[in-house]
Image (cartoon, rainbow, N blue to C red):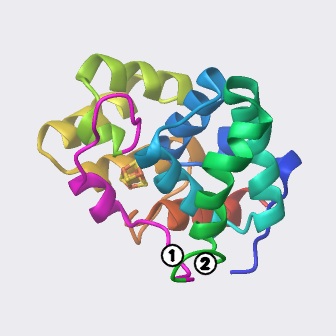
Amino acid sequence: DNIHITLKDIDHLANTSFPLCMRHLFYKLREDHHLKHGGRMQFGLFLKGVGLSLDDALAFWRDEFSKKVGLDRFEKEYAYGIRHNFGKEGKRIDYTPFSCQRIISSVPSVGNHNGCPYRHFSDENLRAALGKMGVGGRSLDDVMDKVKNHHYQLACTLTFEAIHSSSCDTGINHPNQFFVESQKILQ
Ligand code: SF4
């Protein structure tokens, strides 16, 4: 897949093609102008995976973080981690975005906002978040039913199908796959 996204696309794409785990991190970042390490890793690698360049990634995080910690601290404490994710620092490993399995089995610590909302949100918060995505009525009940039975990826697949009014026969197993499948339908 040759999708490349740029800075100005992010808001729009977050609303149309990001899975709930990444929407949540995106909105928390916009709200708090900060994300803790777990959230930065999960979301940063996802953005890299959807084709955001290193320069755009730096600009994106800098825009938000500088509102909270200032430009200096951003450059000193956070820019390294972003370049690191792109394999430009340290051991120069080109890190890959996390799969659903990895995210679902993670244990998000307080305030990190990483993890899978289907697994890690309370029922009430999950219903509210799904409502904001436009999932309601029978579809919402079906999603919550999968969650109750611990089928988190199926819940995400049903969400995908509800918001795209289209089937997803392969099922969702990776946040970046969610994005690519969504773009196939919407583009
Ligand atoms: Fe994200 Fe995967 Fe959970 Fe969907 S099932 S919200 S893509 S971790």
Whole-percent x, y for residue 3 in the image:
76, 72
Does 11 sit left or right of 20 as displayed? right
Left or right of 68 on screen, residue 111: left
**Mark 2 crowdedness (10 Å alpha carbons): few <14, some 14-19, many ≥20:** some
Where in the figure is residue 21, as x and y percent of width and height?
45, 44
Q: Residue at x 62, y 21 (%)?
A: 31
Amino acid residing under circle 2:
Gly
Q: In the rendering, which numbered label is found on residue 124?
A: none
Circles 2 and 1, Cβ within 8 Å, touching? The answer is: yes
N-terminal of the pair, mark 2 or mark 1, is 2
Q: Does 26 sit above or below residue 140? A: below
Residue 133 visible? The answer is yes
Identify which amino acid the numbered label 1 is placed on.
Tyr
Mark 1 burial class by Cα count in 10 Å: few <14, some 14-19, many 20+: some
Q: Is residue 86 magenta?
A: no
| Residue 104, magenta (yes or no) | yes
Q: Check residue 87 in the rendering and tell me which mark sits there, or answer none.
A: 2
Quadrant location, the C terminus: bottom right
In the figure, residue 73 lies in which quadrant?
A: top right
Q: Residue at x 22, y 46 (%)?
A: 107
Residue at the outermost left position: 149
Query: Where in the figure is residue 77, as x and y percent of width and height?
Result: 61, 47
15 or 106: nearer the viewer: 106
Disc number placed over residue 95 in the picture, else none:
1
> What's the residue at 59%, 32% (across, down)?
34
- Would you say the magenta stretch is mainly helix, strand or loop? loop
Query: In the structure shown, which secondary structural element does the residue marked by tag 2 occupy?
Result: loop
What span is colored magenta in the figure? 92-114
